[in-house]
Image: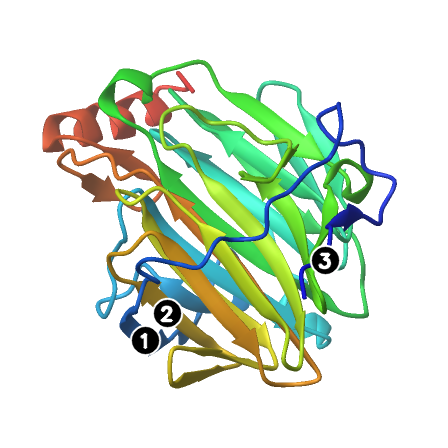
């Protein structure tokens, strides 16, 4: 059965008639190339989190440098937040599922991230910011993804793409499958974030038991999914909560829901293919550029 997708939030589609071709029968569904669990760690002033990309087992997946999942209803796990710290040379993408986090930077920008909102921050040549919980109890849950920038954009002016949940289209893709589109498109509906350098896709998928999701992605892009509720199958493999899968070569991603409700993020991007020199919150191409980044930060030039 093929079901015409529809938008079931008040998000505005990109205009015109909404026609979405359900994924054609895949010629080559991407297989699972890697499957792993994140590592418990802490960052900031002592925020407990699970680092999924950016560890020894998966240092990066070009252009993605890091993926952290945070999720706790114990204030001690998140209350210390991320006080003032710098970034240069890449982008941080914060997607909040639950809780409230206040963001402030040294360029005078400030904002409150609420449940369902996304902040795609291009640090470019430098910002110093803080990310602090604006709650003393309750659940705080979401993801932070780091996306690299090519050499030509690393020293660009900082910028933000910030969207509340009402700006993120929530598309019914097929029976039992819906997708919140942060970046990338399904049919004629596009997520609000754009980044020509890496052409990212970032979907938050919700799949009922037996629901099938199929989506074509550019063959050259690196693609991963992280299951944060329930479980899905890819081919003959069941992938459960807390598991990351990196997809291999193919022209589409195919998933089937197994739990009553499964939720996952599906992320893809065009690899940059340049040398990466990395030191904490600075990600450049060469060691000299890292040294310069530290000097510039210490001299207050961010
Ligand atoms: Fe940060």
Q: Nearer the viewer, residue 177 or 18?
A: 18
Q: Secondary structure at mark 2?
A: strand
Q: Which residue appears farthest toward the right when viewing the image?
A: 10
Q: Is residue 297 above or below residue 46?
A: above
Residue appearing at x 56%, y 35% in the figure: 120
For the N terminus, the image quarter is bottom right
Residue 261 vertical position relative to residue 133 in the rendered view, above or below: below
Which x, y percent locates residue 294?
A: 27, 30
Residue density around tag 3, few if under 14, some if 14–19, many if 20 or more, within 10 Å = few
Residue at which label 2 appears:
245
Q: Which residue is outermost to the front? A: 1
Give the residue displayed 71% in from the left and 26% down from the top.
Answer: 14
Q: Counting other residues with Cα less than 10 Å from the Cα at mark 2, is it few (<14), some (14-19), or many (20 or more)? A: many
- Give me the disc on residue 35: 1
Q: Nearer the N terminus, badge 3 or badge 2?
A: 3
Determine the CA span between mark 1 and mark 3.
31 Å
Find out whether the residues at labels 1 and 2 contact each other: C-beta distance under 8 Å: yes
Q: Relative to 149, is 168 on the left or the right?
A: right
Expressed as whole percent of the image width and height from the top left, the position of residue 73 reads 73, 75
The residue mark sitting in front, 3 or 2, is: 3
Q: Answer yes or no: do the residues labelled 1 and 3 have beta carbons within 8 Å? A: no
**Which residue is denoted by mark 3 in the rendering?**
3
């Amino acid at each position: 059965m093929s079901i015409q997708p529809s938008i079931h939030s008040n998000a505005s589609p990109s205009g015109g008639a909404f026609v979405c071709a359900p994924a054609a029968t895949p010629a080559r569904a991407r297989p699972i190339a890697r499957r792993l669990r994140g590592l418990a760690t802490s960052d900031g002033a002592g925020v407990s989190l699970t680092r999924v990309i950016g560890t020894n087992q998966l240092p990066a997946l070009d252009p993605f440098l890091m993926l952290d999942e945070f999720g706790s209803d114990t204030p001690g796990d998140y209350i210390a937040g991320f006080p003032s710290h710098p970034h240069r040379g890449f982008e941080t993408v914060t997607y909040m599922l639950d809780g409230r986090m206040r963001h402030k930077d040294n360029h005078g920008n400030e904002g409150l991230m609420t449940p369902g909102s996304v902040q795609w921050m291009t640090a470019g040549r430098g910002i110093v910011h803080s990310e602090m919980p604006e709650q003393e109890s309750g659940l705080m849950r979401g993801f932070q993804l780091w996306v690299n920038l090519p050499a030509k954009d690393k020293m660009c002016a900082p910028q933000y793409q910030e969207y509340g949940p009402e700006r993120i289209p929530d598309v019914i893709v097929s029976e039992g499958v819906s997708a919140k589109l942060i970046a990338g498109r399904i049919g004629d509906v596009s997520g609000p974030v754009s980044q020509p350098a890496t052409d990212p896709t970032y979907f938050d998928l919700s799949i009922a038991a037996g629901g099938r999701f199929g989506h074509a992605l550019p063959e050259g892009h690196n693609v991963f999914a992280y299951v944060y509720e329930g479980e899905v199958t890819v081919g003959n493999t069941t992938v459960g909560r807390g598991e990351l899968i990196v997809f291999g070569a193919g022209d589409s991603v195919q998933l089937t829901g197994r739990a009553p409700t499964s939720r996952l993020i599906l992320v893809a991007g065009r690899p940059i293919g340049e040398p990466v020199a990395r030191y904490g919150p600075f990600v450049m191409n060469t060691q000299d550029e890292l040294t310069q980044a530290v000097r510039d930060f210490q001299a207050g030039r961010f």
